């Protein structure tokens, strides 16, 4: 009983790391520009398919595909931001939602065209498969890897935002966009770079998630709900909030699936609705 | 004051084009009798879109979970037909009532929120209900759907395999609900709703209780959506989980935006174009249908902010 609890906690934490990578970019860009980008998971899908393509079709080693997945997703998000999204910053919530859902649909059909609708998988190196036993508890190596990568990226992000000049500009823009502009901060440029970084992290998350949840073209829609929950519960523009929300969501999803399989996703939606009703701006949201 | 009421009367007057439009809805009986079941689907979808228009187009409540009420209506009608009686009109009234009760209950929460929280909450309620229906498979049949009932006919007309009665039934339901919606929109209450849509904080200052009005509108829209769901159940004699799905909520939003939100005929025109296009495109390759919806959405937001009807009326104004 106790060991099953520990493994649920650990697996849920690893899953939460994935959700954090997938959603942190959306949280920060939403906080900055109030732009509701429902196509965020499409960027994650870009990363996922780049990894599948490189690893399975061209025979690259799995770890070497990860930086490419990051860069490809970042590049796609910059191009989309420059060409399309920037025209809609002043549009209504509804228009932004519809427009980005349109992008999601297009991306789903495009990937279905090139890679069919089958579940894709990817081969990871031997040392990432199998399990470790420590003190009577079993840890899957890949999940340990996920936790390490997730924590490292969280630490880097926090350092970057708290310690660098650019990070200070981003924080200023999230707190008060107009004031930041008034102080001479180039918010558009900061936003573009943040958007690319967020898209890239989502791409990395997409690539890392293949081993856990698989990848098919509906990924962009099916994980959107999870990402939105993390963002809405964590509060806009808050990295710590996103981290906490992602971990709570990951663990409660795992626990729900393990202990109450008949409830399905009911529990998660219930938690989300309750949290939103209690704090519409999110657990750690300022607005 | 005389001017204001004259304005209302002028607004509410039936235009010649409207008579032409409703006369055209009878054409499928004679021109395309082999497509009557599609026509029936279109009428039901149009009715559903009309109900979303009441809250989104007129009251400004963005909902990504409107299928919840459609599903409540559909399951109510299905359960009544399966366990109690097969007379459709009373069952339809109860379907609308059940959806209305659900709508009234949630409206108290919905009207307190705006922006992202509102979108997420409506979506959350929709997902919750879909999951609940999936879990309660004893009642709803779960993923297999509710089957094993048959609604023989309505008022002496039998539901036949060609869909003649089905289309007639759906069309009458659409037309009657349209009349109600039209009356509401052109009433002072409808005008107050539009005022709330434009500025919810100023309306109370001129004596219009924003939240009470929004609750009323949300409940009415839920009733109409429930009726649409009930008609679908009765004309197809089956209920699947799909009636509650997120994609149904998203589809109806797309349909309404495509046609033009905040216009009485927006949902109907959108439903005709969307359903016919889907029938044509998805026949060839179903999975790429999403590509075209996506392109339509992007194009509508970029180039036709008020939908097809909005674009047409802008053209019309320009030509004058």
Image (tube, rainbow, N blue to C red):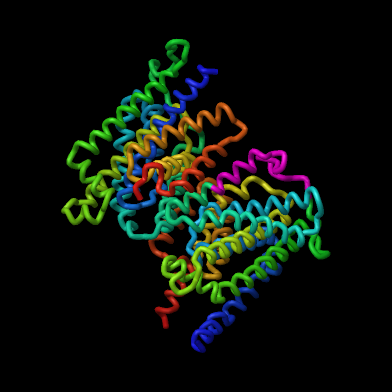
**Picture quarter containing residue B198?**
bottom left
Tell whether A214 sits left or right of B67.
left
Please tell me whether residue A187 is drawn above or below residue A223 in the rendered image.
Answer: below
The x, y position of residue B255, in whole percent, is: 53, 59
Residue in view at x 20 percent, y 55 percent: A181
**Picture quarter containing residue A64?**
top left
Residue A83 appears in view: yes
Tell whether A47 sits left or right of B45.
left
Tell whether A262 sits left or right of A197.
right
Tell whether B83 sits left or right of A17.
right
The x, y position of residue A33, in whole percent, is: 31, 52
Q: Quadrant of the C terminus of chain B?
A: bottom left
Q: Nearer the viewer, residue A204 or A183?
A: A183
**Residue range of the region highlighted in magenta in the rendering:** B125-149
User: How many discs mark residues in the rendered view?
Assistant: 0
- Report if residue B144 lies within the magenta region: yes
Q: Nearer the viewer, residue B81 or A48?
A: B81
Please tell me whether residue A212 is drawn above or below residue B80 in the rendered image.
Answer: above
Residue B285 appears in view: no
The x, y position of residue B48, in whole percent, is: 60, 60
The x, y position of residue A36, in whole percent, is: 39, 51
Name the magenta segment's main secondary structure.
helix
Residue in view at x 37 percent, y 22 percent: A145
Q: Nearer the viewer, residue B262 or B260?
A: B262
- Report if residue B46 lies within the magenta region: no
Outermost right residue? B156
Outermost bottom residue? B2
């Amino acid at each position: 009983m106790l060991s099953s609890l520990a493994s649920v906690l650990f697996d849920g934490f690893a899953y939460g790391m994935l959700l954090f990578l997938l959603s942190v970019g959306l949280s920060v860009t939403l906080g900055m520009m109030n732009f509701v980008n429902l196509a965020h998971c499409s960027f994650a899908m870009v990363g996922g398919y780049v990894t599948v393509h490189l690893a399975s079709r061209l025979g690259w080693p799995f770890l070497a595909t990860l930086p490419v997945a990051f860069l490809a997703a970042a590049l796609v998000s910059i191009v989309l931001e420059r060409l399309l999204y920037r025209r809609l910053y002043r549009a209504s919530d509804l228009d932004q939602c519809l427009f980005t859902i349109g992008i999601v649909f297009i991306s789903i059909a495009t990937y279905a065209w090139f890679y069919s609708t089958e579940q894709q998988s990817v081969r990871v190196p031997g040392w990432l498969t199998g399990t470790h036993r420590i003190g009577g508890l079993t840890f899957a190596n890949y999940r340990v890897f996920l936790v390490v990568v997730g924590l490292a990226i969280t630490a880097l992000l926090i350092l970057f935002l708290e310690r660098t000049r650019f990070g200070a500009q981003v924080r200023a823009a999230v707190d008060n966009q107009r004031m930041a502009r008034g102080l001479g901060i180039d918010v558009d440029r900061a936003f573009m770079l943040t958007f690319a970084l967020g898209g890239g992290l989502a791409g990395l998350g997409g690539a890392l998630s293949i081993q856990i949840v698989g990848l098919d073209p509906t990924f962009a829609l099916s994980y959107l709900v999870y990402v939105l929950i993390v963002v809405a519960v964590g509060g806009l523009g808050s990295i710590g909030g996103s981290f906490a929300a992602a971990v709570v969501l990951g663990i409660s999803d795992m626990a729900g699936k393990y202990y109450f399989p008949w409830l399905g996703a009911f529990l998660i939606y219930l938690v989300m609705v309750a949290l939103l009703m209690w704090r519409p701006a999110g657990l750690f949201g300022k607005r | 004051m005389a001017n204001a009421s004259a304005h209302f009367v002028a607004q509410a007057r039936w235009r010649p084009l409207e008579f032409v439009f409703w006369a055209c809805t009878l054409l499928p009986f004679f021109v395309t009798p082999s497509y009557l079941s599609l026509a029936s689907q279109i009428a039901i979808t149009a009715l559903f879109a009309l109900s979303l228009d009441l809250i989104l187009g007129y009251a400004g409540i963005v909902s990504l979970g409107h299928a919840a009420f459609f599903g409540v209506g559909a399951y109510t009608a299905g359960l009544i037909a399966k366990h109690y009686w097969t007379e459709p009109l009373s069952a339809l009234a109860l379907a609308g009532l059940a959806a209305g009760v659900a709508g009234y209950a949630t409206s108290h929460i919905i009207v307190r929120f705006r922006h992202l929280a509102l979108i997420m909450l409506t979506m959350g309620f929709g997902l919750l209900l879909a999951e609940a229906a999936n879990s309660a498979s004893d009642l709803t049949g779960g993923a297999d759907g509710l089957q094993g009932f048959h609604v023989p006919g309505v008022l002496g007309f039998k539901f036949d395999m060609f869909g003649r009665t089905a289309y007639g039934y759906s069309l009458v339901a659409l037309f009657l609900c349209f009349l109600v919606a039209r009356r509401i929109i052109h009433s002072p209450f409808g005008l107050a709703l539009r005022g709330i849509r434009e500025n919810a904080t100023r309306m109370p200052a001129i004596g219009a209780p924003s939240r009470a009005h929004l609750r009323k509108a949300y409940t009415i829209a839920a009733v109409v959506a429930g009726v649409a769901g009930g008609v679908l159940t009765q004309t197809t004699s089956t209920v699947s989980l799909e009636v509650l799905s997120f994609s149904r909520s998203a589809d109806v939003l797309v349909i309404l935006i495509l046609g033009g939100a905040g216009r009485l005929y927006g949902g109907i025109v959108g439903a005709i174009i969307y359903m016919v296009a889907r029938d044509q495109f998805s026949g060839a390759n179903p999975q790429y249908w999403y590509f075209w919806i996506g392109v339509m959405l992007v194009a509508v937001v970029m180039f036709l902010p008020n939908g097809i009807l909005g674009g047409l009326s802008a053209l019309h104004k320009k030509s004058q």
